[in-house]
Image: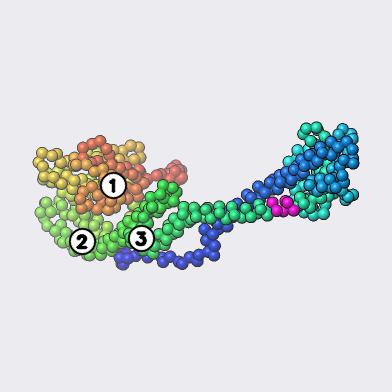
Amino acid sequence: MSDQPNDLPKAAKPESVRRPAIGLSGKLLLLTVVFVMLSEVLIYVPSIANFRMTWLRDRIKTAELAAIVLKSSTADEMVTERLRRDMLATIGAKAVVVRDGGMRRLLAMSDMPPPVGLHVDLRENAVWRPIADAFSTLVHGRTRTIRVIAATPQSGELIELVLDEAPLRDAMLRYSVNILALSLIISVMTATLVYLSLNWLLVRPMRRLTTAMDRFSAAPEDAEHLIEPSGRGDEIGVAETRLADMQRQLVGMLKQQRRLAALGLAVSKINHDLRNILAAAQLFSDRISALPDPTVQRFAPKLIATLDRAIAFCQSTLTYGSVQEAPPERRLINLNRLVADVADVLGLRDHPSIGFDNLVADDLEIDADPDQLFRVLINLSRNAMQALEGTDDPALVKRLTVSAERTGTVIAVRVADTGPGVPEKAREHLFQAFQGSVRPGGTGLGLAIAAELVRAHGGAIRLLDGGPGAAFEFTLPDRPIDLDSARRDANIGR
């Protein structure tokens, strides 16, 4: 045991965390803008191609109307040169050609057009060709001349237009600027809305969780620093609830550990003084054992053995200085006699109101540590006696029974009483110190010690259901046999 009551490590002061230059909210805002702009770019690529095709089709439709006017003229002199130039200016073309079958007819032409740099056939249905041509127009369309071919839906004739690509490029640039401005506006509005939503839904609750963690880590034993769940039904609300539960459990554990530390110091002091007192009592018992009285001669050896056990236990507690029990030193024990010693120490043979039955067979042997098995039986039996002594009604049957049976290499020992039984509330933490007490004012250490000693032997302990009162059963297996050593011993014997 420690000599100081406050051996628990103090909560480390939380280190000051340097906040990043761009917080989570800023990152969310930037990512939202980037993703919206990326989406707009993906939308822009097909839309600019569609804009180009629409612009060219509008020119084709205008050329169709002009071709109808030009073809309806029976004499060339009816269509003046000025009218032809006005029509070409309206269309925005340098030449208009109509093809019907194998014949080509030049309806109008301004000056001699420059060489054609690109042929565009609107009859093609390729998906990627309009996109590639659109970006080609943006890059090379400033000085290039193109020839556009399309079919008229009414007559099925082909119309060819020769025109400068610069007006088309200028229109596409204006459209791109409008798309970019609209994308920026949409991105900023969307990012702002997403930022506000995420800040309300995630960032602020996460900051609240972080602040609660910092406050709690600074003073983990202060219940006022526990986070108060907001009552949200989403994952953040679940996280707040789980954190609050964890903090409450940790506060309880810290309080219990401090209580155990203080108790450990007290036990160390008590053991130290008790060992000295028991040593003095041992000297007196040695003198008493020399008296010729038969009763004294009968009980003196048991008194001396009991004092020896108590002194050895106090010494082992001071030696190990911890709550962990020493490893069992197993011996072969007559269980009937050990149960009889427990009954003598507790005064069960001559108890005025409690009957005692030792139903263990006379020849039943058990492989266990004598002192630890004695402590298991005396703790279980003392708990049973305290339960039976809790009432003074003479009509109640008060009986404590110890029985045992061997099945193969395992022995099952039962300690049963006819008391009021174990309450349901105590069953949840039955074998836990300070939590499994079955009576008011109890600590629950008896059952906890018994369970620890049984487990140290490789066994198990449980509360049996169904009988009147309470019945505890623990099982202890024999030590495993080393087959290699057994074979070697057998060969040596041969």
Which residue is outermost to the front? 78
Res 262 quadrant in image: bottom left
Earlier sequence position, callout 1 versus callout 2: 2
Q: Which residue is mark 1?
A: 430
Residue 420 versus residue 304 in the image, above or below:
above
Q: Residue at x 15, y 52 (%)?
A: 299
Q: Nearer the viewer, mark 1 or mark 3?
A: 3
Q: Which residue is mark 2?
A: 278
What SS does tag 3 mark? helix
Percent x, y for residue 372?
29, 51
Which amino acid type corresponds to the residue marked 3 in the rendered image? Answer: His
Percent x, y for residue 78?
87, 40
Between 128 and 402, the one lying in front of the other is 128
Q: Which residue is mark 3?
A: 225
Q: Residue at x 19, y 60 (%)?
A: 282
Badge 2 density bin: few <14, some 14–19, many ≥20, Cα 10 Å:
some
Between 352 and 57, the one lying in front of the other is 57
Percent x, y for residue 53?
74, 44
* Label 1 – label 3 distance at C-alpha: 31 Å
* Label 1 – label 2 distance at C-alpha: 32 Å
Q: Nearer the viewer, mark 2 or mark 3?
A: 3
Magenta span dominant secondary structure? helix
